[in-house]
Image (cartoon, rainbow, N blue to C red):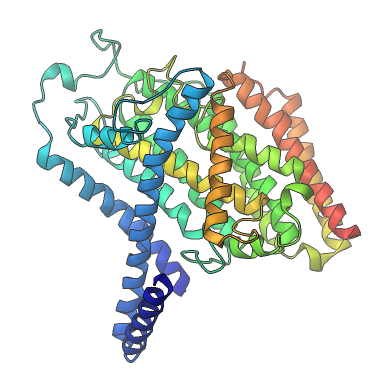
Amino acid sequence: MGSYLDVLVFLLTGVVFVFVGLWAAYLFRPHRPNPHKLSTYECGERPFGGSWVKFRVRYYIFALVFVIFDVEAVFLYPWAVIYRELGLFGLVEMFVFLGVLVIGLIYAWKKKVLQWV
Amino acid sequence: MLTDIAARLQALFDQVHLWCSQSAFWSGVFAVGWSLFKVVLIIAFMVVNVLVLVWLERKVSARIQSRLGPMRVSRPHGWAQSLADMVKLLGKEDIIPRSADRALFVIAPIVSFTAALLVYVVVPMGPSAVVSDLNIGMLYLAAVTSFTVMGVLMAGWGSNSKWTLLGAMRGAASIISYEIPMVLAVLGVVMLAGSLSTTAIVQAQSGLWNIVLQPIGFLVFLAALFAELNRVPFDMAEAESELVSGFNTEYSGLRFAFFFLAEYANLVALSAIGVTLYFGGWQGPVLPPLAWFLIKTYAFIVLVMWIRWTLPRVRIDQLLSFGWKVLLPASLVNLAVTGIYLLWV
């Protein structure tokens, strides 16, 4: 576990570094807020309505396809590491596994999921 | 002279190490202290590189557009420009819009910056000059680089502005779409090396660089790199000519600076990873490993900048269909070809 101590230290230091930086800037930056400065930027016009509104469902569909393929990639990592030892068995296994996913990709393609309509 | 100092430091280090290893408590303190030393070193490396790169990018873009770029701030060639910019950003007022989600707004730059910093843990700069040679290196990298999308989404949604929301949504869609081809392209290299450790991947290339064996994989990796880094031609998250500044429109002062820092730090880190995966990492004749690492990384960065200032931005629909219909099949073919090649050779 020793090598993961570095990861933890890097994680915590990254967070602390941002706060220390902001604190250092706080010491000599001006602070004179007014309602216009604090309003949302909309090209100088008065902001019109909120922004937390409905957005395209397409983004969600792409995210769903992404989840499927990302999980697939995670499954492939251990396989790739020991591929040389697996030999022909590994190759056949991969073709079966990827074949199913390629069929899925073709299905999504044909159903026009991958199209930005 | 230099070797003498190095030897003395080594002796001192060994003495402290020996003294600390007598009790469990002090060896723990020593381990944490050593980690802290490394993180300070890496942050310094990162900041210096970012300052150089901001200047370099402006010079490269100026060169490509037949301009001079920054010339005024100190001679030669305005080298202190990014230092001046940093001081300016430090002195800027910190504004959090009234309608923003304060918690998300504050956390977003922290996530972006920390994710960029975490990538450096597995970047190998020399035979033993790596912060921590994790045996799951490439998997760790895939996990850490995907934090970038969290920062972008948090900033875009938390700002509660139309520009930022549009930028963040497009950025998120492009980053996740290009992550899969990238991860699959990297798998080809993992198969050749038989290990996920970045150091082992470099050592496996002592005879032949992976670029020769993995040309398709490299092209897929390079294309996906631009989406991961939010750079033109795939800079959907920023798109400054249509979305003002994209996901970070509402940020000012140092909070903006942290996004900027993270972006360029990611450029260095992912270029270093590109060199590690395809160009033999720190290996090379005559010069020391660290020099080769820096030369190759900077050559890679200049290539990335060159492409960025040559190509126009693509539309989001073109971007997504290119990712899913060209890059993903190409990376799958690359995987299959690599599998067959390894069985024959």
- In the rendered image, residue B99, in percent from the top left (x then y), is placed at 23, 25
Q: In this view, does B200 lie to the left or right of B54?
A: right
Q: Which residue is drawn at 50% across and 64% down?
A: B130
Res B321 → quadrant? top right
Res B238 → quadrant? top left
Instruction: Give B300 or B264, whichever is nearer the viewer.
Output: B300
Q: Which residue lies furthest to the top in this view?
A: A45
Up-down: is A3 above or below A20?
below
- In the rendered image, residue B304, in percent from the top left (x then y), is placed at 56, 35
Up-down: is B125 above or below B14?
above
Up-down: is B180 above or below B325?
below
Q: Is residue A106 left or right of residue B174?
A: right
| Total number of numbered discs in the rendering | 0
Q: In this view, does B212 lie to the left or right of B246?
A: right
- Residue B92 in view here: yes
Q: In this view, does B117 lie to the left or right of A89?
A: left
Q: Residue at x 31, y 57 (%)?
A: A13
Instruction: Give B63 or A30, whichever is nearer the viewer.
Output: B63
| Quadrant showing the N terminus of chain B | bottom left
Q: Which residue is drawn at 72% across and 43% down?
A: B217
Q: Residue furthest front?
A: B1
Q: Residue at x 32, y 84 (%)?
A: B16
- Residue A100 in view here: no
- In the rendered image, residue B188, in percent from the top left (x then y), is placed at 73, 51
- In the rendered image, residue A104, in percent from the top left (x then y), is placed at 75, 37
| Quadrant showing the C terminus of chain B | bottom right
Res B233 → quadrant? top right
Q: Which residue lies furthest to the right in this view?
A: B344
Q: Residue furthest bottom?
A: B22
